Amino acid sequence: MEFPDEQPQFNPLRNRGSDRAAPTPLSIGRGERGGGGGGGGQSPVVPSDAVPQLITRLQQEIAEANPSNAIYFTVDFLCQNYPEHLEGFADIFHGAPDLEEERTQVAHFFALHKIGLARSSEFCKAGYDTLDSLMLLSADDLNQIETANGVEWPPGHKIRLQQGFGGCVVSLC
């Protein structure tokens, strides 16, 4: 996969108006976006003189929209208009609500077994982000998840996970 040598310039005035389209899933990882698409590219460089322009634009957008939650509006605005600068965060932020619900259930499953959110996140990153996929896990798959995330779990966590996924199907049913 090849990436262009020139990085797109930051323009705080682009996408002004109704042509704000969210990034398509097909553009992820093709080099059309910044670093978060899984392709290993870098985020576009933002010149420091563009920051005041962006803040001015954000103030204008907030004044026009008058949102009830300005922080959420700001994050949403940045995700819609500048996803290449957020290294994949926009894709997570605009993720499908049903998938978010599944991931929440996975987090609750881990919390029920007194396993922290960090471990839950590692399972989701490795593709085990639904309760159905967790039912297919065996104690042997835990090493693959640990390797896929590039982490080394503390011995106590590993033992608790091995015990938990030894009888995982029983726990979920």
Image (cartoon, grey):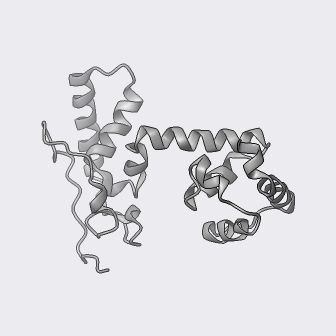
Give the mark count. Answer: 0
Q: At which x and y percent is residue 4?
A: 24, 76
Q: Quadrant of the C terminus?
A: top right
**Residue 35 falls left or right of residue 168:** left
**Residue 173 falls left or right of residue 124:** right
Q: At which x and y percent is residue 62?
A: 27, 27
**Residue 64 falls left or right of residue 29:** left
Q: Quadrant of residue 108?
A: top right
Q: Quadrant of the N terminus?
A: bottom left
Q: Nearer the viewer, residue 49 or 22?
A: 22
Q: At which x and y percent is residue 41?
A: 37, 71
Q: Residue at x 31, y 56 (%)?
A: 25
Q: Nearer the viewer, residue 173 or 32?
A: 173
Q: Quadrant of residue 106?
A: top right
Q: Nearer the viewer, residue 102 or 107?
A: 102
Q: Residue at x 65, y 53 (%)?
A: 134
**Residue 159 falls left or right of residue 8:** right
Q: Residue at x 72, y 65 (%)?
A: 142
Q: Is residue 138 above or below residue 160?
A: below
Q: Is residue 55 above or below residue 63?
A: below
Q: Is residue 74 above or below residue 122?
A: above
Q: Quadrant of residue 143?
A: bottom right
Q: At which x and y percent is residue 73?
A: 34, 31
Q: Residue at x 87, y 57 (%)?
A: 156
